[in-house]
Amino acid sequence: MGIQIMPSLLSSDFANLQREIESVPSADALHVDVMDNHFVPNLTLGLPVVESIRKATDAMLDIHLMIDEPDRWAPAYAEAGAESVTFHIEAAAAPVRLARELRSLGARAGMALKPATPIEGYADLLPELDMILIMTVEPGFGGQKFLDLCLPKIRRTRELIDALGSPGAQRRGDIWLQIDGGVSVETIERCAEAGADCFVAGSAVFGADHPDEMVEKLRQLAQH
Ligand code: DX5
Ligand code: ZN
């Protein structure tokens, strides 16, 4: 997989989701932020809305669960037809079991890390996962400023992923390295240079006059 741009519906107009989804045909996936007002201090949408979005589009759905007890709730999103389901490692009780369950339901399993959570303690989990999400803002809200302090972690995670792809390693294949928070024309090149290949952008895309052109522009910047 090359560079992927995933607009976050959090910054879209929730009263017109169908129209907003259709405004970004170049998106590689639609990023859907589920918040429970416990894991993060904000409340967004849940399973019924994801089920409706599933019916409204064939686009890949990338679910980002910012919720407590993902072990309990995450599998239902895979059952609803989401291609990718990401849980926060800070909230997961049994991440290996959860990742295996998501994969058995046909979804890609993602693990997200808040800015203060180091990757090192979780390196051994990588073979069980299809995506690592490095948060580059504190999760909870769109439109926050990108945290440069996360760049070294992106680099270290890229090294860990690449090491798994080397001959004789436990696993080969595609583990995507996703960045979420403050991604824009100003910051995306830094993230790409550090080794990210998958970019969530909310306010940058849906705040643009022409959202789909912004998707293409971000992709071009990341490819350099
Ligand atoms: C924040 C969410 C993000 C959010 C990003 O906690 O996980 O997906 O939509 O928004 P921007 O791109 O505006 O920082
Ligand atoms: Zn997100």
Image (tube, rainbow, N blue to C red):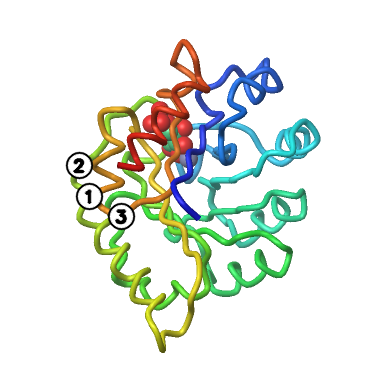
Of the two numbered discs 2 and 3 on the same chain, state the one appearing first in sequence.
2
- Residue 41, above or below 203: below
Residue under the point 31% across and 65% down:
119
Outermost residue on the right side: it is: 55
Quadrant of res 31: top right
Say which of marks 2 and 3 sits in front: 3
- Which amino acid, by three-letter code, is at mark 1? Leu
Residue under the point 52% across and 23% down:
212
Which label sits on residue 148?
Answer: 2
For the residues labelled 3 and 1, say whether their Cβ atoms are less than 8 Å apart: no
Q: Can residue 141 be seen in this view?
A: no
Q: How many marks?
A: 3
Quadrant of res 186: top left
Q: Can residue 25 be seen in this view?
A: yes
Q: Where is residue 153 in the image (x, y as percent from the top left)?
A: 25, 57
Q: Where is residue 209 in the image (x, y as percent from the top left)?
A: 46, 10
Mark 3 = which residue?
195
Residue under the point 37% across and 37% down:
181
- Which amino acid, by three-letter code, is at mark 3? Gly
Left or right: 50, with 130 as reference point = right
Residue under the point 50% across and 65% down:
174
Which residue is more in the foreground, 79 or 40? 79
Mark 1 = which residue?
151
Q: Where is residue 201 in the image (x, y as percent from the top left)?
A: 43, 32
Which residue is more in the foreground, 58 or 38? 58
Structural distance between the alpha carbons of marks 3 and 1:
9 Å
Q: Quadrant of the C terminus?
A: top left
Which residue is more in the foreground, 28 or 76? 28
Structural distance between the alpha carbons of marks 2 and 3:
14 Å
